[in-house]
Structure formats: structure tokens, C-alpha cells
Image: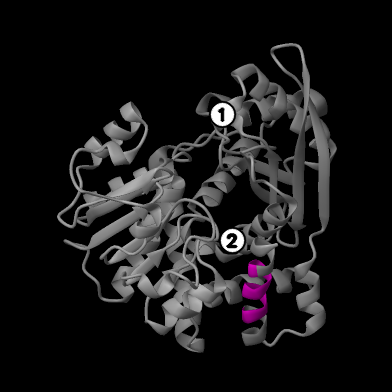
Amino acid sequence: MLAFSNAMRQLDGAAAHLGLDLGEVAKLKEPDRIYEFDIPVAMDDGSQKSFKGYRVQFNNARGPYKGGIRFHPQVDLDEVKALAFWMAIKTAVVNIPMGGGKGGVSVNPKELSQSELERLARGWVQNMAQHIGPHQDVPAPDVNTNPKIMDWMADEYGKISGDKTAAAFTGKSLEYGGSEGRGTATGQGGFYVLEELAASLGMQSAGRRVVIQGFGNVGYHFAQLVQRAGYVIAGVSDSKGGVYDANGLDLEAVMKAKQEKGSVIDYAAGTKVTNQEMLEQECDILVPAALENQITAENAGAVRAKIVLELANGPTTPEADGILWSKKIYVAPDVLTNAGGVTVSYFEWGQNLAREHWSEREVLAKLELVMKNAFNAVWDTHKKHGVELRTAAFMVAVRRIVDAME
């Protein structure tokens, strides 16, 4: 029950600072709807297997539910509820007219063939078709789902509903109505937030060391952006471990090692460290870009960064937040920092409905403006109320949601 109770504690902290009454807070703690269902899938060998599917529609006061679908063995209702709540907060922080939802399937997708995966994806839509749609609930990719899976889902939804807009799903491939810039949007949005935060703290980028836990699409793209801006990538890790070099890593060589041999630990130079040790390395900016609950009460005291920039969802526990703040470490919270993905998803949705296609330059210019405005709203609240950035972000979002509900 950890993820959802953590999310509710974050809400309580913000609500107390806003002076909300208990009735208003109680309304924000209950999801609007929860769907749990079994998805029977015909396997390639002729057998039948059943997988547990979920969708939580948390809050739509500000617009259609919005949020990804993850395929992961550890997906359960508690996690999906927490992620759906965080999505409602996230869309409100960046002030886009959407709400929050989340979906998932409890499955290890690596164990399925392409055709089994497609049948599973279409099965999820068959269960949810009457509860989703361009003006109702707009899902997107998340952990272990990708544009191809979204294409299958959007196609299935179109077949069932007759919808021709393709706006019921975002994160699709370009040929199926996806947006330019979507694949790199999360890292890009995080980079814009880092630039604003560093400027607010009077921190120059040149030579500043960055350590990234999680070297998938988001972590790798973010690493490329910060390196171009003059930062030094001192450490990266993936699920098998990490590699650290205070003088800087050769990013392309690290990626080559990961692609050819399976992990960044196969990179020839640097010091090999575990994922936990990676969080404790000497650096200026620590970027958790993997899974939740990585920085906890046990290890927060050992963090040696000036900024923790959350590109993962929920990587820092409430206890760890308190410890980091007492050490004057600024945590740029996930609900702000990784909201580039949902922002470009919103752009994709708008393009689909208007039958338009924007250039990457247009998309990134719009994204930069949204992220900078969101950062400034959070920073101003932080300054005014003397709270850390996560509480400030929640205060901005909760105020907007409560106003919409009223």
C-alpha cells in the first residue's frame, strides 16, 4: 500500500498549507472510478492465458482523464491508483486542460511474442472501450508500452467505436497521428526545468556533474541534452548496475555497450557501482529516472547532490523528502519535472482533434513555454510559503483542481 499512502501524505501536506477544509480534501482522495478486469489471450501455442487489467480514472474536474498504461509484473491496484492521482496533479501543475488516470496490465511483456502482445493490447481496449475516448479518457504509453502498442490500441478503439480522430490514445507513431517530439518530450521537459532551477539558484551549467539512475529512453535523451549544455555526465546506471567516472563518461560508448552487451556496466572505463551506490555518488545533480521509492529514509542522508531532479514517478519517499530538505538539497518533483511527456501528449490530442500536424520546432517551443510557466508558478509558491518544491507543486495543482471542482 506504499505508493498510494505516500501520495495521500503529499496531498495532506499541500492541503494543510492551503487551508482546505476536510470535505474538500476527502473529495480529492477518492478516485472517480476503478476498473479491474481479466484479459483472456490466445497464446501462440494454442493455450489460453488470462492477465489482470486495470484502469483508474481519478479526477476529471479540469478535463478528460489522462495517463499511461504500463505492462509490468508488479502492476497492482495500489500502484495504479497512486499513479492516477499523480497524473491529476501533474496535468494541473503544467496547467493543461486534462485530468488524471492510469492503467496497467500485470504481465512480463518480455515473455510474450509480438502477436501475443498485440492480442493483449487489443484485449485491454475491448474491456475499456465504452469508458475511454477523446473527450472522456485518453490513455498513453508508460513502462514497457510504446508507440506500436498505442497504434494497436487506437486501431482497436476505432474499430469498436467508429471514432476517426485517432485522439483516444496519444504516444502513437507518427504515421498513425503521433506528435513530433513525443519520444523525447519527458527528457526535454526535465531539461527545461533544470535550466530554470539552476538559474534560480545561480548555478552555472559548465562542468557541473550529473548522475542518472535509469538509462532508458528518458535518461539517455536527458543525458544528451545536459551534455550539450556543458554539464558533465559522471554516472549512469540501468537495472544491472552502473558506471561512474568523476571526469565524465563517453555517452555514446556507454550506449553502445548497453545495446551490444545488455548493460551500461559493460562500458570499458569508469568504476562499477550498484544502483544504490549510484544514488550516493559525488555530483551536483542527481537524476532518478528509473522506478519509484529509490531515495528513502535509509539512504537520503548519503545523497551528495545539490539538486535531485525526478524524471521517474515517485522515486523519493516522503521521509526522504524531509531529510533532503533539511540538508538544503532541492528536489525538483516528478509532477513538474517529468510532465513534458503528458504535455506533448496533450499537444498530440489537440493536433488529432484539429486534424493538424505541427513541426518539431513548434512542439518544442510550446513545450518550453509550458514548462517554464509551470516552474515559475511552483518557484513563486515555494518562495512565498517557505515550503520545499514538491509541496509547492502540489499546492499549485490542488488549488487549480479544487477551483475546477467548485
Numbered range of the magenta stretch: 6-13
Relative height, residue 148 to residue 315 (above, below): above
Front residue of this view, candidates 132 and 216: 216
* Residue at (43% x, 44% y) in the render: 239
Q: Which mark is residue 90?
A: 2
Q: Are marks 2 and 1 in contact (CB under 8 Å)?
A: no
Q: Which amino acid lies under the numbered mark 2 shown in the image of this protein?
A: Lys
Give residue 243's position: percent from left, percent from top.
27, 48
Residue 109 drawn at (x, y percent): 60, 31
Task: Using the rendered view, name the quadrant where residue 161 is placed.
Answer: top right
Q: Identify which residue, 354 or 164, lies in the foreground.
A: 164
- Towards the viewer: 130 or 48: 48
Q: Which residue is painted at 37% across and 32% down in the image?
A: 262
Q: Which element is circle 1 on?
A: helix
The amino acid at mark 1 is Lys
- Res 110 label: 1
